[in-house]
Amino acid sequence: MSFPPDTTRPIERAARDLVNSSYAIALTGAGISTESGIPDFRGPSGIWTKDPEAERRAFETYRKFLSDPRAYWEERLRSPSLLGDLSQVEPNPGHYALAELERMGILKCIITQNVDDLHRRAGSKRVLEYHGNAFRLRCVSCNARYEREEYDLQRLKDEGKLPPLCKRCGGVVKSDVVHFEEPIPTDVARQSLKEAWRCDVMLICGTSAVVYPFANLPRIARQRRVEKESRTESGLYVVEQVPATTIIEVNAEPTPLTREKVSDYLIQGKTGEILPAIVEEVKRLTRS
Ligand code: APR
């Protein structure tokens, strides 16, 4: 893959930033999965872009669950997923590139908004699923997670026994997918905050960065400062507070993080092409 100079230079810069990092993490959104055939939400052919009414309905889902879990489940079992059949898709070079950076000991964690399980299937081990996982269920009382196969949902429906109940505490079980206005599960929320505060490189891939609280994570990382010693021209010895984290975006288009200069730089293009190029450059730097 060859890139124009205004893409090659930031790719080389990102590789250097990653090689020089001590704790790099990645944040990902639907954009990293579009090259696997899964539509994103707000890109030019995104699900919400093409059907704003579907987004408005999605804002009702969690309220429906709270008021009538049985009806929530009957609706879920009746209608197909907006993302299509996720069991038929495969990771793409963007997912594999992040898994490779983890294997190289550079990437310590991925915090993803995606529910498609593709980072884990690409070989990434430390993945925080900020908006849950479409193949899992979760107890809303004790946060216990279950593989979807652990419940025969159709039989529960036929026998009038919906909603499924937690095998551990008896609480109500819903899809692990976090709906609009649903709280982020406390265990994932807490760990994600720790990662955002700890990292010294944050690689943000394929997200429009408009959904909160996920979009707060880069802003939190931006707040962290470290002391840097320097000497002025007159020989004065000074210590100043400088940003502790380098924030890099890889995205098809600029985002609020770009415009508000929360990120240090944007490498504009496809994650499936740019991330493998960054990995190749990291390998070149670590070989030499
Ligand atoms: N390479 C790089 N960027 C891409 C690619 C690609 N191949 N394909 C799409 N993009 C960009 C789009 O231009 C857009 O800026 O990725 C971004 C995807 O943004 P969204 O569609 O808003 O997806 P995301 O940011 O993950 O949405 C966050 O919104 O609806 C909720 O819960 C849903 O987790 C989702 C959340």
Image (cartoon, grey):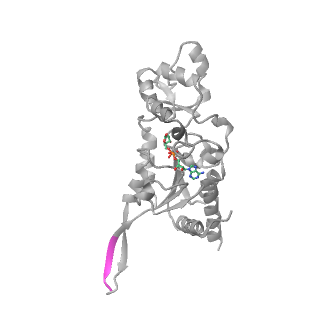
Residue toward you, 193 or 273: 273
Q: Position of residue 67 (x, y in %)?
A: 41, 22
Left or right placement of residue 279 versus residue 54 in this view = right
Q: Which quarter of the rendered picture does the C terminus lie within?
A: bottom right
Q: Is residue 179 above or below residue 70?
A: below
Residue toward you, 199 or 42: 42
- What stretch of residues is rendered in magenta? 235-240
Q: Is residue 140 visible?
A: no
Q: Which quarter of the rendered picture does the N terminus lie within?
A: bottom right
| The stretch drawn in magenta includes residue 101 | no
Count of picture labels: 0
Q: Quadrant of residue 225?
A: bottom left
Name which residue lies at 50% across and 25% down.
166
Name which residue lies at 33% across and 72% down.
240
Q: Main secondary structure of the magenta part?
A: strand
Q: Is residue 106 above or below residue 162?
A: below
Q: Is residue 123 visible?
A: yes
**Residue that lies at the very extreme toward the bottom in this rendered image:** 234
Q: Position of residue 12 (x, y in %)?
A: 58, 68
Q: Is residue 109 above or below residue 54?
A: below
| The stretch drawn in magenta includes residue 237 | yes
Q: Position of residue 28 (x, y in %)?
A: 53, 49
Q: Position of residue 238 (x, y in %)?
A: 32, 77
Q: Is residue 212 above or below residue 76?
A: below
**Residue that lies at the very extreme toward the top in this rendered image:** 159
